[in-house]
Structures are given as C-alpha cells and as structure tokens.
C-alpha cells in the first residue's frame, strides 16, 4: 500500500513575498544555526521575517530562540514571536524528550497545517529550516509551497559535500532555484591569531563551481555560535561584531540582493478537463 | 535550451482518448490516457509491474468504464499529478518523465 499522500493541495502564501528553504542533505552541518541567524540578520535589516522549523523529528529552533517548554495554544497563539521573528516548530507542541515516530503522511499533514493554519500574516521572508535528506518534508514543501529559492549548507569535508550534492540534485529535479552554497564550520581563528581549518578547506567553493551555483561564503567556527544557540538568542544579535555575526549579516544583504533579481520559475499550464 | 529548462507551454485534450503537450522547444506530442496510466511511476505500480498479473483478478467497477483523468494538476514547478477514473491517484509524473514518454 502506498504511503504517499494522495492529496497535494497547492498552498498559497499571498502575504509572504519570498519563501527560502535552508537545506543540506547531511545532518549536523548547521542548517538550523544558519536558518536562525539568517532570519535574525534579515530582521535586523528591517525585514518582516518568519521561521518555520520543518524538522519534525528533531526540531532545534525552539532552543535557539529561548523557548524551553511546550506552548499552551489556548493561551499563546501561533506563530510565536521571539526577538521580532515569527516562529513555528513541532518543538512547541512536543516535549524535547518525546520522540515523534511518524511516517510520511503524518509529516506531510503537520507541515501543511503549519503553513496553512498558522496566520503568518505579511512577511518579507519566510525561512524554512529543512531537516536533513531528500525525503518527505522536502517533497511536501517542493510539491505544495511556492518556494522562491533554496540555500544549501555544507561543511568543507567530502562526507558533507557528497550529501550536499544530493540535496542540490533534488532541487534541480524539482526545479527550485538554488541561491547558492554556504560553507559552515569553515575555519577558526586561534588565540595565536592563526587561521585553522580542522575540516579541510575549499570544499564548498569547489562544489559550487562543479554544479555551477553561486558560492555564498564561509561561516567560521565560533564557540559563541553554539553558546548563543543554546542560550536562545542567535549570535547575529548577541555578537554582531564577531566574524560569524558579520558573515551572517553580509549573507542576508547578499540574499536580499540576489532575490530581487531572481526570475520566478515558469508556471506550469493547466489542463482543462 | 537545456533539459532542465524544458517545460510544457500548453496542454489540451485530444478527443476523449488523450492529450497533446506542446513543449517550450516547439515539440508537440500526443499521449493516450491508456499509455499514461500504464506508465504510472508510483511505487505501487512499479511493484505491480514486477509481479506476474493475476488472470483471475476481479476487476473493479471503475475499471470497466473508459479510462480518463478526473484531475490533472501541477505539482510544484516540476510535475503533474493525475487522478484516474479507475480510482488510482498516487502517480506523480515529472516533466522529465513526461518528456521521455513524448520522445521515445
């Protein structure tokens, strides 16, 4: 029996100007950190921003925005607003110690509800933090949501690049434009002032060149990034003058510029039955 | 124009038996409903093709009427989903796959 959802409603998001998916292919490369800090940087530059945590199995956005307990919807409407950003996550509904053990159709339903039943209002950007891989969540979003573009996060080493390539191929197959590749954990600056590259170097740029998409830059390893994530305030806001904070700020400027000149995907013709 | 850029610019029914797709590179091709249904790419149809047909299978009532789509809708920017009159509705036909059907 197929477990594919038979109903694929087209989700209109008329109040949202751009929908950006942050993807990778591989887990643990920092998608949620990038999503949270990119959303923060866009907001700091005056945009109205929403952030949808599409990782139903392992939601990270609640912790990164200081939400440490489940939300009573009777008293607190969704989307939640923290640091000026509208948020929605499965982590607001399920305690962190509880596993969500769901098959694809349930994932599809949850994400569809997050998009259609949460009053996002007027937004300049809705950033969607995708889970790793190329599975149900990605299929639901690419099949039903008017995605403006995707950003692919990788780390420098080959084991991450292998999966990033798969993520890129997925977006090519489903014809979602790719903004580019962002390399996370690229380097750190030691106390001696030297640059260290523990995960190798050049991987993200090389991959971008191979698949002919823009290279969006590097994010350094910064202990403050992890700490700010755990403390509930993205580093772009808590440490704006850090190398990583400036990198996210510049990334947001670049993305705003790129999107303004993006060609929308062709609308497919319908068949009059 | 690269394969990734090819897309339908027009789709229209051809009588009661199929449709005509006109592509962005000018290719025009007619495909019958029966062929499209037979080539359904969903997982259950692929599995069915790998097992020998059961000659004693009792047909459903919906299979006794001429086959036609009851719904034909775009999926994202990359595919169409077809709901058939025989009740089958899980096939998602990517543009790449439709193009392959047209050119082979």
Image (cartoon, coloured by chain):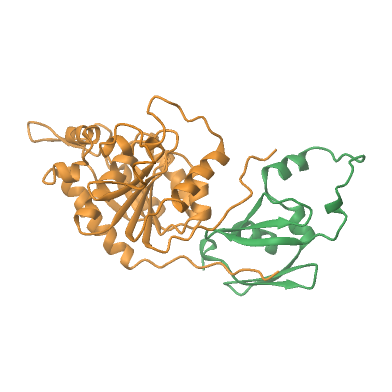
Q: Does residue A116 appear left or right of residue B30 in this picture? A: left
Residue at figure coordinates x 61%, y 51% from the top left = A7
Q: Is residue A12 above or below residue A37?
A: below
- Chain drawn in green: B
Q: Quadrant of the C terminus of chain B?
A: bottom right
Q: Does residue A154 appear left or right of residue A246 in this picture? A: right
Question: Which residue is at the front of the view, A117 or A35?
Answer: A117
Direction right: furthest residue: B56
Can residue A173 be seen here? The reply is no
Q: Position of residue A17 (x, y in %)?
A: 36, 63
Question: Which residue is at the front of the view, A272 or A160?
Answer: A272
Q: In the figure, residue A200 lies in which quadrant?
A: top left
Q: Position of residue A237 (x, y in %)?
A: 17, 45
Q: Position of residue A213 (x, y in %)?
A: 37, 55
- Chain drawn in orange: A
Q: Does residue B43 appear left or right of residue A171 in this picture? A: right
Question: Which residue is at the front of the view, A171 or A198?
Answer: A171
Q: Does residue B10 appear left or right of residue A33 in this picture? A: right
Residue at figure coordinates x 77%, y 62% from the top left = B68
Residue at figure coordinates x 57%, y 41% from the top left = A105
Direction front: furthest residue: A74
Q: Position of residue A254 (x, y in %)?
A: 25, 58
Can residue A102 be seen here? The reply is yes
């Amino acid at each position: 029996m197929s477990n594919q959802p038979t109903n694929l409603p087209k989700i209109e998001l008329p109040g949202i100007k751009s929908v950006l998916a942050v993807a990778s292919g591989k887990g643990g490369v920092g998608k949620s950190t990038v999503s949270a800090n990119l959303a923060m940087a866009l907001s700091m530059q005056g945009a109205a921003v929403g952030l949808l945590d599409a990782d139903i199995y392992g939601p990270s956005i609640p912790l990164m925005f200081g939400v440490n307990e489940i939300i009573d919807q009777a008293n607190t409407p969704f989307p939640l607003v923290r640091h000026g950003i509208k948020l929605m996550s499965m982590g607001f509904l399920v305690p962190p110690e509880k596993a969500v053990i769901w098959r694809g159709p349930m994932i599809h339903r949850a994400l569809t509800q997050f998009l259609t039943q949460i009053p996002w209002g007027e937004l300049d950007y809705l950033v969607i933090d995708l889970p790793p891989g190329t599975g149900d969540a990605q299929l639901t979003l690419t099949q039903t949501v008017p995605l403006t573009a995707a950003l692919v996060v990788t780390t420098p080493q080959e084991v991450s690049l292998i999966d990033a390539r798969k993520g890129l191929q997925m977006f090519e197959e489903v014809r979602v434009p790719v903004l580019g590749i962002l390399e996370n954990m690229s380097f750190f600056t030691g106390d001696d002032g030297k640059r260290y590259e523990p995960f190798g170097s050049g991987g993200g740029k090389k991959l971008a060149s191979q698949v002919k998409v823009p290279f969006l830059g590097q994010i350094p390893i910064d202990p403050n990034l992890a700490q700010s994530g755990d403390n509930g305030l993205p580093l772009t806001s808590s440490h704006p003058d850090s190398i990583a904070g400036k990198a996210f700020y510049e990334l947001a400027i670049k993305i705003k510029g790129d999107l303004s000149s993006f060609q929308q995907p062709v609308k497919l013709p319908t068949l009059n039955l | 124009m690269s394969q990734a850029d090819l897309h339908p610019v027009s789709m229209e029914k051809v009588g009661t038996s199929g449709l005509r797709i006109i592509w962005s590179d000018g290719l025009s091709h007619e495909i019958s409903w029966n062929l499209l249904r037979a080539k359904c790419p969903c997982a259950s149809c692929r599995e069915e093709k790998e097992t020998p047909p059961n000659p004693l299978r009792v047909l459903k009532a919906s299979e006794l009427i001429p086959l036609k789509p009851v719904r034909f809708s775009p999926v994202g920017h990359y595919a169409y989903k077809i709901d058939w009159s025989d009740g089958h509705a899980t096939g998602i036909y990517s543009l790449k796959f439709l193009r392959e059907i047209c050119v082979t």
